[in-house]
Amino acid sequence: MQVHESVGGIDRLDAFAGTILIAERDRNVRELEQHFLESAGFLVEFADDGPAALIQARRGFPRLIITEILIPKLDGLQLCRELKLDATTRDIPVIVFSVLAAETRAKEAGANAFLRKPLVPSVLLGTIRRLAMLEAHSFTEPQ
Amino acid sequence: MITIAAPDRRKISRSADYMADRMTSGNTEADYILGGGFPLNSINIIMGHPGSGKTIFAEQLMFHNAADDRPVLYLTTLSEPLAKVVRYLQGFSFYDENKFGSQVIYEDVGEQLATDGPTALVPLLREAIRSRSPKIIVIDSFKAVHDLESDGGNRRRMVYELTSLLTAYGTTAFLLGEYTEDDILRYPEFAVADGIVEMSRRRLGNRDERYFRVYKLRGSRYLEGAHAFRITSSGLDIYPRLVSPALPEGYEPATERVSIGVPDLDKMLDGGLWKGTTTLLAGPSGAGKTTIGLQFALDGARKGVPSLYMNFQENPSQLTRTIRNLGVDLDDEAKARLDLVYASPVELQIDSIIVDMFRRIEENGVRRLVIDALGDLASAATDPQRLHDYLYALVQHFAARGITSILNVETTGNTIAGETMQNAMSYLSDNVLLLTVDGEQRTRRAVRVLKTRGSAHDLRVREVEIRPTGLVVLE
């Protein structure tokens, strides 16, 4: 992975460029995620609920998925389980990014990492970086 | 050695685990009151009248937490021009020019708010978050933003937008404002705030008293009540309110006697004072209270017991003369164990004296203590209930720590009846001794033991004399 430049204090991660699918309802969180991830060189796509995220994941094969647990119709943990059960999506790293303290449940659901809200850009990007470098399926502790 | 009392910071131990999800205020005493600091990523209101110290408190916090990771952002709105804020900031010792402008960023958004209205605040903040990623955001004054909007519905919408943004993004926010207590029910930000701290000021004669109070702090075991503070060149010097020890009944009643320093008085007390008890020594001026208090402290020092004499009446030279007149010659070791402290009653603030006293008790392992006299402490406490709470807590702390104490109190006559504070202290104290002065030339002095808890005592009124070597009980 190469860091090409820094924009507004955010390192661009062009070598890891690709689409990140985000299942999130909170307008402010979406807006901030979009800003900081795009500043780092990612394309960002949003899903309003769990079933929509599942469809978009199967159709577009994003590089990484970030999901809140509290999303309509299919919660983020169940979404994670379904993604990990599907052979076509199981290798997509999933970050559960939630207001709930649910690290253990996220791990049990197969998430590759868990982050507790609120959004701290360096923590979110650092986690994405580690997942990109590891390209592993094991659970990653946030730092 | 005689020292002049000066307020000093109390050392407070803190659990590293407990502090992990906390942001220090940059002030040890404030952190102690807050239960370890402010919760990380919380929204807090710092309220108080103009000049109460809000901005200084916030700036101390900002500069203490400033580092290379993410900057601290201070937005001034419509209360004070930025140039004025920065000019006064530079006078404080916590100001660091190397941090200013890089780690601590000051921005004036007053003009834009005046032009575009209060709804401009949230977009301004959103842009600041995008471009600077601040870990702390201070808005000074937030209440002033409200003054631009008369419609209550619009105010509420703006606060909702603001708190939604500040909740989504990882930052600890401080909204400063000249709010009053009535405003807590009036302004919507109080309903969503995680923490509310009030800083108040009230005039007392020729000086001001300032108080720091936590109204609310979610998820925190904060110390309730009003805590006195002063503004100094290093920021805020806060004196946490003295409260009773957590389990005062947990200590073992002492079985050891402590000499009062006057052998004849020890006999009247059936062998001396019980260790860890508090004795009220009451009497009119000139009755011998200071003499007995000094004899008690000097006796302790001679026997290797660290002793503290808190004195508000005799200045250092007067006290030295009094000790010399007693004919006491302490060796260097004994002198080191005797801490004679003078605090001016004119500048006395009860909270600062209490903090200073406990610092000395902890540092020196004090086991004998004299306060000469309680009336000076009383005059420093404007609120009788506050004084009573303080004295009650003092006695409990002394007992829990095994400190044997004498509290001198001056009466207007030869009785303690009818004197409010003395009566209250009589109830709180384990022992009460009354000294009297009679005769045409006021030359006949006497002592009577009014009360001893858990001990027999001499019920008679005994005549006493103050001789060059100290007080003597006559046959």
Image (tube, grey):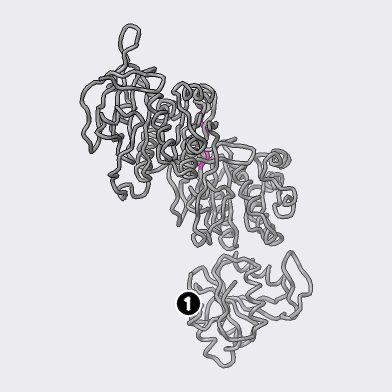
In the image, the segment drawn in magenta is B198-203
User: What's the magenta bit mostly, secondary-structure-wise?
Assistant: strand
Report x, y in % for residue A125: 66, 72
Report x, y in % for residue B457: 22, 31
Above or below: residue B438 compared with residue A91 = above
Above or below: residue A142 compared with residue B310 = below
At horizontal 66% and vertical 81% (from top left) the residue drawn is A132
**Residue B65 occupies which quadrant of the picture?**
bottom right
The chain letter for the residue carrying disc 1 is A
Instruction: Indicate whether residue B105 is drawn in magenta.
Output: no
**Residue B242 occupies which quadrant of the picture?**
top left
At horizontal 50% and vertical 78% (from top left) the residue drawn is A106
Query: Does B87 sit left or right of B224 as displayed?
Result: right
**Residue B393 occupies which quadrant of the picture?**
top left
Foreground residue, B333 or B438? B333
Q: Name the residue under label 1.
A: A104
Q: Is residue B194 visible?
A: no
Furthest residue in direction bottom, as rendered: A87
